[in-house]
Image (cartoon, rainbow, N blue to C red):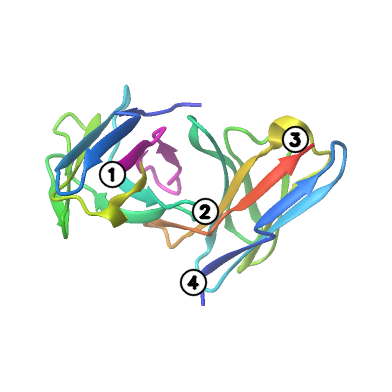
Amino acid sequence: GQQLNQSPQSMFIQEGEDVSMNCTSSSIFNTWLWYKQDPGEGPVLLIALYKAGELTSNGRLTAQFGITRKDSFLNISASIPSDVGIYFCAGRVTNFGNEKLTFGTGTRLTIIP
Amino acid sequence: DADVTQTPRNRITKTGKRIMLECSQTKGHDRMYWYRQDPGLGLRLIYYSFDVKDINKGEISDGYSVSRQAQAKFSLSLESAIPNQTALYFCATSDGMEQYFGPGTRLTVT
């Protein structure tokens, strides 16, 4: 099945630093989603993007829907310890009655004390 | 209370055994999904259901079956478990817009 290329695979940063990660696809998506997964839990939706070029914020998180519709970016500003976890992008080709998501392989964020 | 619950949360079983994972939701959503998560592979769709009478295969349905007993319940079965089915399994629901995930079931097949 199709997978999205998500990078980087892992990040080690210090508290207070800004974080950037991205996803790219060979196919066009009409929706991009960003999820965060904490250890032992299911993914939680952070931001949803529905329009090419859209820039959406959720607190310290900002995500953008790429103009080409083949990529998306997530930025976290001034990281804090609770930002630790795995971040997944997901894309959707929204056809009528079809809303299957394709997930990226995840970016594992670790904060170094 | 959680909107999407999964039972059991952890299960160890032996090769060849039949096992059922259950998912219940209180969100009132029609659409339900089963995903499998393996390290380095993200989440992959096993089966999905858009209503009680609708069942669809995902990208990795071989070796799995599902049952949609009611709008709120969607079960995943492994008829004869094998070690490479060791993984994290997630149920999700959707109102037609976004998907909301349960806490997961960690399954180990020895």
Q: Amino acid at mark 2?
A: Gly
Q: Earlier in the sequence, mark 3 or mark 4?
A: 4
Residue B100, percent across and down?
A: 44, 59
Residue A74, percent across and down?
A: 21, 42
- Please state which of the two labelled residues, at mark 1 or mark 2, is closer to the viewer: 1
Q: Secondary structure at mark 4?
A: loop
Residue A34, percent across and down?
A: 31, 47
Where residue A111 is drawn, which disc sits there? 1
Q: Secondary structure at mark 2?
A: loop
What residue did someone put label 3 on? B63
Q: Amino acid at mark 1?
A: Ile
Describe residue B22's horizontal placement relative to residue B93 as left or right: right
* Residue B14 vertical placement versus B102 (above, below): above
- Please state which of the two labelled residues, at mark 3 or mark 2, is closer to the viewer: 2
* Residue B90 vertical placement versus A8 (above, below): below
Furthest residue to the bottom? Answer: B1
Instruction: Indicate yes or no whether the magenta region holds residue A77.
Output: no
Give the magenta-colored segment's residue range: A88-113
Label 1: few (<14), some or many (≥20) within 10 Å? some
The residue sitting at 49% across, 56% down in the picture is: A41
Say yes or no: labels 3 and 1 on the same chain. Answer: no
| Disc 1 + disc 4, Cβ < 8 Å | no
| Disc 1 + disc 2, Cβ < 8 Å | no
User: Does residue B76 appear in the picture of this structure?
Assistant: no
Say yes or no: labels 3 and 2 on the same chain. Answer: no
Label 4: few (<14), some or many (≥20) within 10 Å? some
Describe residue B3's horizontal placement relative to residue B70 as left or right: left
Where residue B27 is drawn, which disc sits there? 4
